[in-house]
Image (cartoon, rainbow, N blue to C red):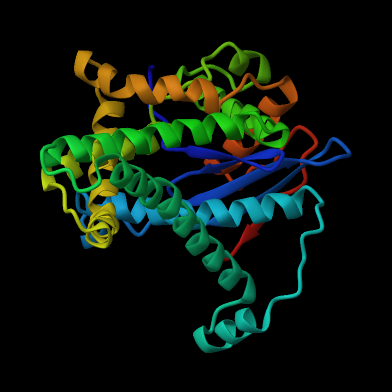
Amino acid sequence: MARVSSVGGQAVMEGVMMKSPTGVALAVRRADGTIATRYDNWTTKAQKGTFWGLPIIRGVVTFIESLTTGMNTLTESAKLAGEDIEEEPTKFEKWLSEKLGKSVESIVIGIAVILAVALSVGLFFMLPLGISSLIFGKAASVAGVWKSLTEGLIRLIIFIGYIAFCSSIKDVKRTFMYHGAEHKTIACYEAEEELTPENAAKHSRLHPRCGTNYLFLVMAVSILFFAAIGWNANFAVRLAMRIAFLPVVAGLSYEVLRFAARHDNWLTRIIRAPGMALQRITTKEPTPDMLEVAITAFNLAMDPNNKVENGAEEPAQSAE
């Protein structure tokens, strides 16, 4: 590739989010065929030269920001698409909003992030721990490193099975098609070609800086990391250690991803290979109209002051 884009993205409901160093752009295809857009000013807290921008720490910050931004854009994409998702806030949400001085919507998104993390911990940590405990019981004859490696392998199998299951759901499959459109758009830009659906369609839907690669690296790094820490016979202690060290694992994985994306040699190709293979599940070939949406989001992220083309609505720029 001739250049590396500073824009990253995410597939959302009937659209694509593109995030630049200065803002988040969202483009969504409505039922009437038009493309609705939204732009919000945004900068990461992991700025170079600050504490939050230090190696390892920046990975944790980026992970948390990705979760919150992802939840927010999913909600916004539903609104832009014209979906009526308004619900009456619960008394608890209203109470939190008053006490914390945040909007009810921010509180709802925060709760959604917490629930998503809790589900992930249960599915990818508690379940593998429980299965490995059933397999080994109190067997002292098996070395702790093999127990940890087995637990990690079980976690990886659950992760891959979860992704495969999601890809079989019709609505998720469409989202994966928009995921492919996001990658093709960025690849087209990095190849220094004019951003058109025809040009973007020629490029690969697989990309080395994809979040799928990152998630796989979290799984792989966790296997090696927890194998090095050792095995504790107490289930509660093992679970607490997994959760406590999760930020470290996320930070280390982020650094490995950055290294693998910035270099091209036999080592980095090996590191990228499993994640790239998984993208064959998490991305699907998009249609031309999906590529049009992704290109609209990308152009808006690169230059929010330009008028959006292709029949899109004017960007609603936030003052945040």
Instruction: Say whether residue 210 is visible.
Output: no
Q: As rendered, which of 225 and 66 lies closer to the eye?
A: 225
Q: As rendered, which of 94 and 120 lies closer to the eye?
A: 120
Task: Give the quadrant of the N terminus.
Answer: top left
- For the image, the number of numbered tags is 0
**216 left or right, relative to 301:** left
Task: Give the quadrant of the C terminus.
Answer: bottom right
Instruction: Say whether residue 261 is visible.
Output: yes
Relative vertical location of residue 27 with respect to residue 264 in this rendering, above or below:
below
Q: Position of residue 58 (x, y in %)?
A: 28, 52
Quarter residue 224 falls in: top left
Quarter residue 257 falls in: top left
**195 left or right, relative to 57:** right
Q: As rendered, which of 150 and 79 lies closer to the eye?
A: 150
Q: Position of residue 181 (x, y in %)?
A: 61, 26
Q: At 60% from the left edge and 76% from the top edge, which residue is drawn? A: 103
**248 left or right, relative to 83:** left
**36 left or right, relative to 253:** right
Q: Position of residue 47 (x, y in %)?
A: 30, 55
